[in-house]
Structures are given as C-alpha cells and as structure tokens.
Amino acid sequence: MSLEQSAALVEAILFLENEPVDAAALGRITGLNRAQVLEAIGQLRRSYDAKTHGLEIVEMGGGYTFVVKKQLWDLLKPRYGKRSEAKLSRAALETLSIIAYSQPVTRQEIENIRGVSADGMIKLLAGKNLIREVGKKQAPGRPVQYGTTKEFLKVFRLASIADLPKLDQLDAEKFE
C-alpha cells in the first residue's frame, strides 16, 4: 500500500472516530505497522498544514484526532462550543492546576497549598470529568489521591501531562 493510500485510510478512521485513536489501534484497524501509521499521520499533518484547511490532526490524550484549527475555533466556539459548559471559576482553575502539577495529590495537600477547603472544587472538577480518584496514599487514614483525566487532556489540547507549561522555580516550589 502506498503512503498516500495509508494516509487516506488513517484519515478516514480519524474522521469516523469520536475520540482520539492511538497508533496501536490505528495499526490494528488498518493492518499497518507502527512506523507506517506514524508516517501516514506525518503525511496527513504536512498536507493539512500546507493547505488552507479548517482542521488539523493533533495528538491528544495519547491518541490522534481531528480538531478545528485554534484560530478558527475562537470564531466558531460561540455557535459550536458546548453551551452548557460553564467556564471554570478562578478557584476551580487553581484547584485543577494544583492537581495537574502535583498529581497524585490528596484533598489535604490541595487545601494546604490553597489555604481553603477543596471539597466543593474537587466535586465540581470530578463532575466535569477533569479529575478522578487515582489511588490511596500510603499514610494514616489512606486518603484518596486525585489526578487528571483524558478529558482534561482533551479540553486543554495536551498530548500528555508532560506538555503542561513549565513552572518557574518559585511557582514549582508552591506545588511541592
């Protein structure tokens, strides 16, 4: 199969899927090996970047998916964005950033950093599927530890937690 045919096949799969698809799954569906899948994705990315398209292929949450180009999404969001999705408050964003940079982290650790109760924010963020319980700390009382979800990665257009903006030394010390 030629690179163009492989790219077309991968493109069709990404178009049909609602969620990001990882390279291994693309390989199973297409019969291509990992290198061929990645080469096809590279070909598609170059094609979409080189031409005037409203979409791009991004790696998000460990898989690949189509998204509207950022500059166009800002124009389209009022009509096509999730209307029921309220913006996160400053307190929710603070709590979410603490969890993202410190995960796995307990409620008490979040409260120690923020200086206020985190129960409400944890419930809100869990309800929006941005965080989840990831385990229990090996400490007295075995408190629940929280971490971010794949939905968090999708919302913030991140391939992985490693793609979070780097903190300067002063900010990094706050999260320890």
Image (cartoon, grey):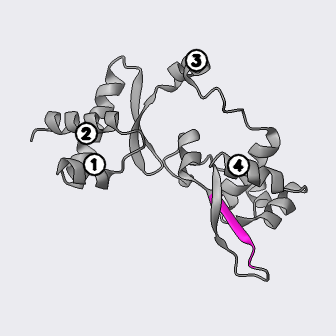
- Work out which residue is located at the far left of the displayed protein and give it: 1
Which residue is the site of mark 4? 125
- Gap in Å between the C-alphas at discs 3 and 2? 29 Å
Q: Do the residues labelled 2 and 1 touch (CB within 8 Å)?
A: yes
Total count of labels = 4
Name the amino acid type tagged 2.
Val
Where residue 79 sits: x, y (%)?
58, 17
Circle nearer the N terminus (2, 1) = 2
- Gap in Å between the C-alphas at discs 3 and 1? 32 Å
The answer to which quarter of the image holds residue 65 is top left
Viewer-nearest of discs 4 and 2: 4
Where residue 21 sits: x, y (%)?
36, 47
Q: Residue 79 carries which label?
A: 3
Q: Main secondary structure of the magenta part?
A: strand
Q: Are marks 3 and 2 in contact (CB under 8 Å)?
A: no
Quarter of the picture holding the N terminus: top left
Circle nearer the N terminus (4, 2) = 2
Residue stretch in magenta: 142-147
Circle nearer the N terminus (3, 2) = 2
Residue shown at the point (33%, 33%) measured from the top left: 15
Q: Which mark is residue 10?
A: 2
Q: Which mark is residue 26?
A: 1
Where residue 24 sits: x, y (%)?
30, 55
Q: Is residue 21 left or right of residue 5?
A: right
